[in-house]
């Protein structure tokens, strides 16, 4: 029996289709195909259920949500239900008429990802030629339309040297908010970890650059900084605690406590096709498994931070210890922490591998390419 | 655009921030890009007076009158709260 308060936010992953191939994509290794995607009517029902459940914000994401032709309809429905509407996009498919249609529907905020400030390197990281220029144009369009803009900058060892330039870019583009998100290592990013992981020294420098910029830009630009937790002393409160504030709906309709949760084997997820969001939030097996503190092993169980960091990240525990119920190895109290640090040191000091494993659909025997 | 608010500033919510009556939890919340702030009754009352026209001095006068509280103390508290929201980009003045 669950005693959870209502969730604050819903991440609506409308599709896994995306023109980019970023090697740290947060989507699972096995991507949902277009034929698996929820239809418009189901999304409209889910949005109503989310608002009734107490969700306050809905983030339309993907994949690239702009590939869905019903995006404006979904945004309009969410806004009418009182939800704060946010579009999380690569922006390479955004043009003026499309933006106008989303704005008329009630869109309030746009988050655009940037891969670097140097166009050639940005396009190489995204695996998409000309993408950077398109993003710059789209960001200007968003501001000219009078919409709020967040720049999302995923940082790692192949672009961290441009951190100051990224802060300048956010200012020049008129963003109100900059999210500096160091890569977190699950799924695709874990496959590319040795290409991406910065050294402890580089992370320390980045923290100093961000601290100085925050002070300098107070009241002009809000900077959120998600640091890579391999070098942390205590783990991050992943998702603000499992099943406490957040739900994620995958394109196929599975409801996940976090976007990476499908990396945990033997965890049963419910689908919005079969149950209401309220029922799923209340007692879905996947949500109940790590909710609260009673599932915790030692050293978490008796730790005075157990309701501050909630034992860290379940997906990271799974990926690095083979046990999703273990203490997150990012915590210095984990018996796996020393090994984690040694791996980070070795990989961040080694030569950068020649190429990325780009995020792509696996080719099926009877298929040529990913669905259009 | 000064980052520091004074009694003469005329604050209002920034264009992409809105207040909402949160019926599921009870109380007012402030919704902004990827941020939710739960407001206590006093904070909600102060923000309702921040319409972009009234200056902070006038807002403090009104609150001091309503709550029969010392005006200078109220002014100090209101400035502190609004400055914090200003720094978070939720308020313009």
Image: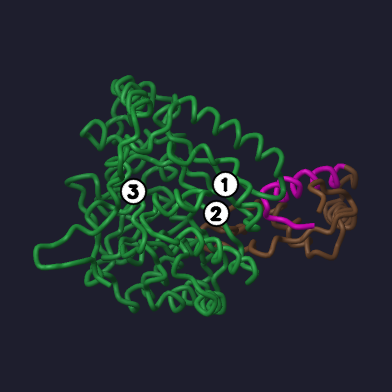
Q: CA distance from mark 3 to mark 1?
A: 19 Å
The kind of secondary structure element at disc 2 is strand
Question: In which quadrant is the C terminus of chain A drawn?
Answer: bottom left
**Which chain letter goes with mark 3?**
A
Nearest the camera: A95 or B42? A95
N-term mark: 2 or 1: 2
Which chain appears brown?
B
Q: Picture quarter containing residue A39?
A: bottom left
Q: CA distance from mark 3 to mark 2?
A: 19 Å
Kindly identify which residue carries mark 2: A151
Query: Which residue is at 89% across, 57% downward?
Result: B58
Magenta range: B73-93
In the rendered image, residues at marks 3 and 1 fall on the same chain = yes
Q: How is the image coloured?
A: by chain
Is B85 magenta? The answer is yes
- Tell which tag, 3 or 2, sits nearer the viewer: 3
Tell me the number on the disc at residue B14: none
State the image coordinates of residue A50 (x, y, percent, origin top left): 42, 65
Please give left or right for residue A95 compared with residue A272 in the image.
Answer: right
């Amino acid at each position: 029996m669950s005693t959870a308060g209502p969730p604050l936010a819903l991440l609506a992953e409308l599709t896994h289709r995306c023109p980019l191939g970023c090697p740290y994509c947060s989507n699972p290794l096995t991507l949902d195909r277009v034929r698996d995607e929820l239809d418009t009517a189901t999304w409209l029902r889910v949005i109503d259920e989310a608002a009734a459940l107490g969700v306050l914000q809905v983030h339309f994401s993907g994949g690239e949500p702009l590939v869905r032709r019903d995006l404006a309809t979904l945004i309009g429905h969410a806004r009418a239900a009182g939800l704060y509407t946010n579009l999380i996009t690569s922006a390479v498919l955004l043009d003026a008429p499309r933006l106008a249609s989303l704005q008329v529907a009630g869109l309030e905020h746009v988050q655009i990802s940037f891969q670097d400030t140097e166009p050639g390197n940005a396009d190489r990281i995204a695996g998409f030629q000309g993408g950077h220029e398109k993003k710059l144009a789209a960001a200007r369009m968003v501001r000219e339309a009078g919409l709020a803009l967040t720049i999302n900058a995923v940082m790692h060892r192949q672009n961290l040297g441009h951190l100051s330039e990224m802060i300048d870019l956010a200012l020049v583009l008129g963003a109100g908010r900059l999210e500096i998100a160091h890569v977190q290592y699950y799924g695709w990013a874990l496959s590319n970890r040795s290409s991406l992981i910065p050294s402890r020294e580089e992370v320390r420098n980045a923290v100093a650059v961000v601290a100085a910029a925050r002070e300098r830009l107070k009241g002009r630009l809000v900077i959120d900084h998600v640091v890579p937790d391999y070098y942390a002393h205590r783990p991050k409160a992943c998702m603000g605690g499992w099943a406490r504030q957040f739900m994620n709906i995958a394109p196929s309709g599975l409801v996940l406590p976090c976007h990476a949760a499908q990396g945990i084997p033997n965890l049963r997820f419910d689908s919005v096709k079969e149950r209401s969001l309220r029922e799923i939030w209340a007692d879905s097996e996947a949500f109940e498994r790590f909710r609260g503190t009673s599932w915790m092993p030692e050293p978490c169980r008796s730790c005075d931070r157990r309701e501050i960091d909630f034992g860290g990240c379940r997906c990271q525990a799974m990926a690095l210890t083979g046990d999703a119920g273990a203490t997150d190895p990012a915590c210095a109290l984990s018996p796996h922490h020393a090994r984690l640090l040694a791996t980070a040191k070795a990989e961040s000091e080694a030569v950068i591998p020649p190429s990325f494993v780009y995020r792509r659909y696996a080719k099926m025997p009877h298929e040529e390419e990913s669905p259009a | 655009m000064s980052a520091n608010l004074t009694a003469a500033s005329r604050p209002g919510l920034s264009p992409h921030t809105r207040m909402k009556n949160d019926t599921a939890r009870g109380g007012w919340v402030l919704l902004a890009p990827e941020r939710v702030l739960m407001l206590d009754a006093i904070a909600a009352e102060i923000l309702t007076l921040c319409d972009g026209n009234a200056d902070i001095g006038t807002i403090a006068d009104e609150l001091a009158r309503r709550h029969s509280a010392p005006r200078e103390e109220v002014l100090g508290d209101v400035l502190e709260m609004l400055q914090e929201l200003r720094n978070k980009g939720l308020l313009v003045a």
